[in-house]
Amino acid sequence: MKFDRRSALLAGLVAPLAAKAQTAPPLSDKPLPAGLTDPTETIDLWPKGAPGKPAKLPVEKVAERSTDAALTDRSVTGVSNPRMAVFRPRVANGASVLIMPGGGYVRIVLDHEGYVLGRWLAAQGFTAYVLFYRLPGDGWAAGPDVALSDAQRAMRLIRARAIRDGLDPERVAAIGFSAGGHLCADLATRHAVKTYEPVDAADKLGARPFVAAPIYPVISMTAPIAHAGSREQLIGKDASPEREAAHSPHLNVTKATPPCFLCHAEDDGAVPVENSLLLRAALKAAGVPVETHLFTSGGHGFGMTKAIGKPAGVWPELFLTWARSQGLG
């Protein structure tokens, strides 16, 4: 979907109605390693609270999993206030990236699939938004569409604020990892599906990413290719074939799916590389531009830091080159 003058004006008009940015509280009491910064700004997605609350609201918890004093590896569970943490560049190139970390739909792996990438993208001139999305196992009314609701809303809010923030409302990319890669691919293929009732004028804007980058993504919900943990959390252990198909992005690709960048390690022991291959085949069949990189080694969950020195470690530069060739930055 291309943004015309009317869309840009609309984005500027709805910006005052969209959620306001606020100072980001620290995630934990543990000080960050020297040289690292957390975002100083967050944007709540839902002005009156997230829709479809469960009877017992989940309690957000942050766990630090790193034993290395020089590294952080925080994970978040129980998100009840979906939001975006914002990394702004010193000199913006006008393009934005929505980042969806993974975590098997039971947690959000915040640092190496979120904040590290956010800092790096900001250093390249991009405005980066790390998404704290709700998890399907926490009892929200939207069920398997709850994370997609947050991703759609996030895309619309970024566009609603774009003119005010000096950004291009069209050039908003999406990138996700593992289960977050599933969410990214779900957004790319089902961006126009209605998953929530509109809450303000921002919801008149489109949720289609300019480009999308599902990285070592969970794609198929059908055994044996499906990642069993993500599948169970998203659609249930005993899901029907119809329910599997509804939430397998490669079966929902259309000509309206944006160009995609895929990368995966052949030695991924958690999410088989066939997931990316299925999505690639579907994109090719629909005539959607796709760039694919398969690496001999890298394992699963390499993000920005865990593949350094391995073939998969070059993926960020490959993504950046491809994104610029598509007109993103």
Image (cartoon, rainbow, N blue to C red):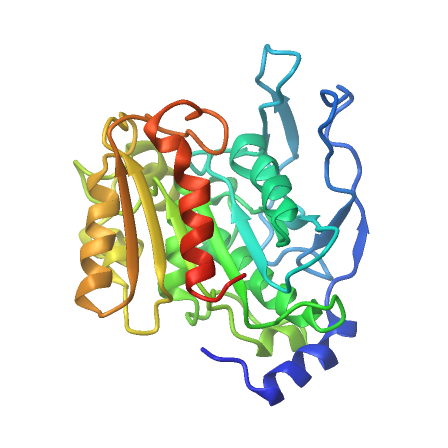
Q: Quadrant of residue 188?
A: bottom left
- Residue 281 in the figure: left or right of residue 260: left
Q: Residue at x 65, y 47 (%)?
A: 122
Q: Residue at x 34, y 39 (%)?
A: 216
Residue placed furthest toward the right: 23
Q: Nearer the viewer, residue 106 or 127?
A: 127
Quarter that holds the C terminus: bottom right
- Residue 144 in the figure: left or right of residue 41: left
Percent position of residue 262, x then y:
33, 48
Percent position of residue 185, x then y:
37, 54
Judge whether 158 appears above or below 119 on screen: below
Judge whether 204 appears above or below 19 on screen: below
Quarter that holds the N terminus: bottom left
Q: How many marks?
A: 0
Residue 57 appears in view = no
Q: Residue at x 79, y 73 (%)?
A: 16
Q: Nearer the viewer, residue 214 or 106?
A: 214
Judge whether 196 appears above or below 99 on screen: below
Q: Residue at x 68, y 74 (%)?
A: 200
- Residue 202 in the figure: left or right of residue 287: right
Residue 244 appears in view = yes
Judge whether 32 appears above or below 193 on screen: above
Percent position of residue 184, x then y:
43, 53
- Residue 258 in the figure: left or right of residue 162: left
Percent position of residue 58, x then y:
62, 38
